[in-house]
Image (cartoon, rainbow, N blue to C red):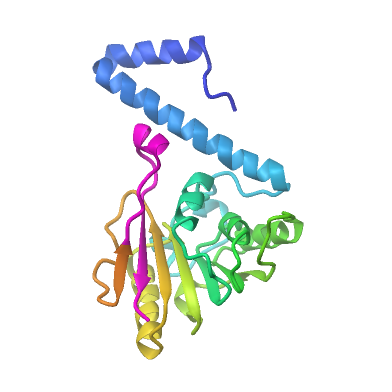
Amino acid sequence: MRLFKGLADFRTFREEWRKQGALGALKTAREAMRLRLQIAGDRRFDRTYGVDTCGLTLLTDLSVGGGNIADCVYYDPTPVRLLQRIFRKLPRELDEYIFVDFGSGKGRVLLAASRLPFRRIIGVEFARELHEIATRNIEIYRDPAQRCRDIQSVCIDAREFEIPPDKCVLFFYRPFSGPVFHRVLERIVASYRANPRKMYLVYCCPFSDDPFKSLDFARKIPLPAPLFERLLPGGIGAVLYETRE
C-alpha cells in the first residue's frame, strides 16, 4: 500500500479544506496516514508468514448465535504496531506465564505472542469459522524468532473458559462487552482471590471505559505512545495492569 497517492491525496485534502477548514483538513489527512501505516504493517505481517489474519468480518457473516451475540464485536484484528508496544512493557521472564487472548479471531495475537517465551498460548474464540482459520494459521506459521510453540485456539464461549491457575497475561482487544465481559471479569477476580499471583491484564478499545480500574489488587502500568504515534494520534487505546502476588 502506498502511503502517499499524489494528486488524489491533494484533491481530497483540498476538498476537506473547503468543507472543514485548515484544521479539519489536517486532522483528516493525519487519520488517513495513520490508517495507511497500520494497514501496511498488518499486510506485511501476513505476507511475511504466509498467514491470513487481515480483514474485517461481520458477525452476520458467521454462523454464531446465542444470548451473547449482542455483546460481541465483529472481527477486526489487533494492529501489529499496538501489539509491539504492549509486548515491550511485559517482563522479560515469561516462561512461567500462560498467555490468553479472549476473542482471538484468526489468531494474529497468538502468533505475535509466540515470539515471547510464554509457557503456553491460548486463544479463546466463539466463532467456529474464525477458530478454524486460526488453527490453520498456527499450523502454517514459521518464524526463526519464535520462542513458544505450544499454541492453541479453543472454540468456546468466553464465559465458560476457566482462567488458568498459573501466572497469566490476559489480553482483550474489544472482543465483547456487557454481561459477557462482566462474567469473564468475575472469573478473573475469583481466580485471583482463590490463588493470588502475578497476572497482567491488557484491554484495548477506543470507545470504552477502563474495565480494570476498580480492581483493588491491580496497579496500572503506563503505556506511553512512541513519538510517531504522538504525532499521528488516534486509533486504538490500551491499558495494562499488573496484579500483586
Please state which of residues 129 and 86 is positioned toward the viewer in this rendering. Answer: 86
Please state which of residues 83 and 17 is positioned toward the viewer in this rendering. Answer: 83
Query: As displayed, is residue 9 above or below residue 163?
Result: above
- All told, the count of numbered labels is 0
Query: As displayed, is residue 196 above or below residue 199?
Result: below
Q: Is residue 41 left or right of residue 174?
A: right
Q: In percent of the image, x 28 and y 22: which residue is there?
A: 24
Instruction: Single out the residue that lies furthest toward the front.
Output: 92
The quarter of the picture where the C terminus appears is: bottom left
Q: Position of residue 237 (x, y in %)?
A: 36, 49
Q: Position of residue 226 (x, y in %)?
A: 40, 42
- The residue range painted magenta reads 221-245
Q: Is residue 111 left or right of residue 166?
A: right
The quarter of the picture where the N terminus appears is: top right
Asked if residue 231 is among those painted magenta in the image, a careful observer would answer yes
Q: Is residue 174 left or right of residue 144?
A: left
Q: Position of residue 67 (x, y in %)?
A: 42, 70
Query: As displayed, is residue 58 above or below residue 66?
Result: above
Q: In percent of the image, x 50 and y 62: which residue is there?
A: 103
Q: Position of residue 165 (x, y in %)?
A: 49, 85
* Quadrant assignment, res 156: bottom right
* Quadrant assignment, res 220: bottom left
Q: In percent of the image, x 27 and y 57: which residue is there?
A: 209
Asked if residue 197 is among those painted magenta in the image, a careful observer would answer no
